[in-house]
Amino acid sequence: MTTEDMPLSGRRIALPESRELDLFADMLIKRGADVLRCPLVSIHDAPDPQPVLAWMRELIATPFDQVILLTGEGLRRMLALAERQGGSLHDEFVTALGATPKLTRGPKPGAALRKAGLRPDRVAVAPTTEGVIETLKGENLQGQRIGVQLYGTDPNRRLVDYLTEAGASVSTVAPYIYADDVEDAQVDQLIDALLAIEVDAIAFTSATQVRRLLQIAKRREQGESALLAALTRIKVAAVGPVVADELRERGIAVDLMPESSFFMKPLVRELVKVLG
């Protein structure tokens, strides 16, 4: 193997990804990287499915004027829940969703729609809450009934308040929750490796990972400030603007991020470009 085949040879990269950790790790290992895995969070179905089912049935019975989908994860979990319910719920939900104008926050909800044989009608100008609001600006929302599929259990007051103030009636749904995936001790091991500068880079793929890492760091003797100082000596990668904004808000500089397509493959390409 040449250095061209293995551009990340000799580099160690920390991955806090959970859902697609193996896929992400394999992409980096194939390029020669040594990978430090530490899944920080996991995603579970909403503990009570009844509010989710009620939202889907509301869409079917009295269709919304438009639906805003913030994540692909949420739509996938609603479709899976409808499938598990049996009967005609899944098909009725897909049909009703197909007939409703759909605005997606970014590419992931669009991909989930396409998997169900549907397409987004509009994609936000940027894959953020602000991007969704910007896309809706200038639109008359007075009297509209708008369904919003949330990001985890975050009530997204910024978006909901904007819609309400514009005269819309908003119905939200939270199809999944984030849960701690590992014992604090494992997160501590990751923090130890970061403090000792034992990695060349850390690649974040969700804002929740950032919050969880700093939450554990705060409980330690050295505190959050020691981790923030260590991160200035390591390349910090973000999969997209939502994660980058979270990092910057916490005082962490973002060294690299894909320019337009906010997925793992473009993130791997950026890591190769910077570390290769």
Image (cartoon, rainbow, N blue to C red):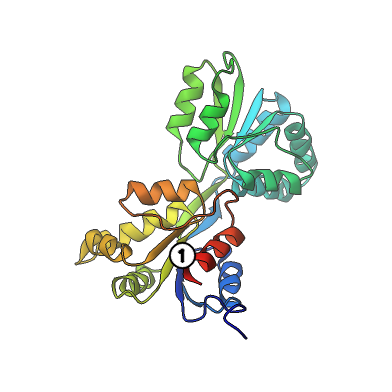
- Which residue is found at the position 55% from the left and 79% from the top? 32
Label 1: element kind: loop
Is 179 left or right of 212, judged from the image as shown?
A: right
Is 202 left or right of 5, judged from the image as shown?
A: left
How far from the left and from the top, in percent, is residue 76? 66, 49
How far from the left and from the top, in percent, is residue 258? 54, 54
Name the amino acid, label 1: Pro
How far from the left and from the top, in percent, is residue 36? 45, 75
The residue beneath circle 1 is 16
- Which residue is found at the position 58% from the left and 60% from the top? 264
- Of residue 91 and residue 166, the one placed in the foreground of this image is 166
The extreme left residue here reads 221
Quadrant of the image occupied by residue 52: top right
- Which residue is found at the position 64% from the left and 39% from the top? 53
How far from the left and from the top, in percent, is residue 149? 58, 37
Is 111 left or right of 147, judged from the image as shown?
A: right
Mark 1: few, some, or many residues within 10 Å (few <14, many ≥20)?
many
- Vertical relation: 180 (above or below) 11: above
- Of residue 29 and residue 9, the one placed in the foreground of this image is 9
- Which residue is found at the position 58% from the left and 17% from the top? 141
- Vertical relation: 143 (above or below) 184: above
- Of residue 73 and residue 227, the one placed in the foreground of this image is 227
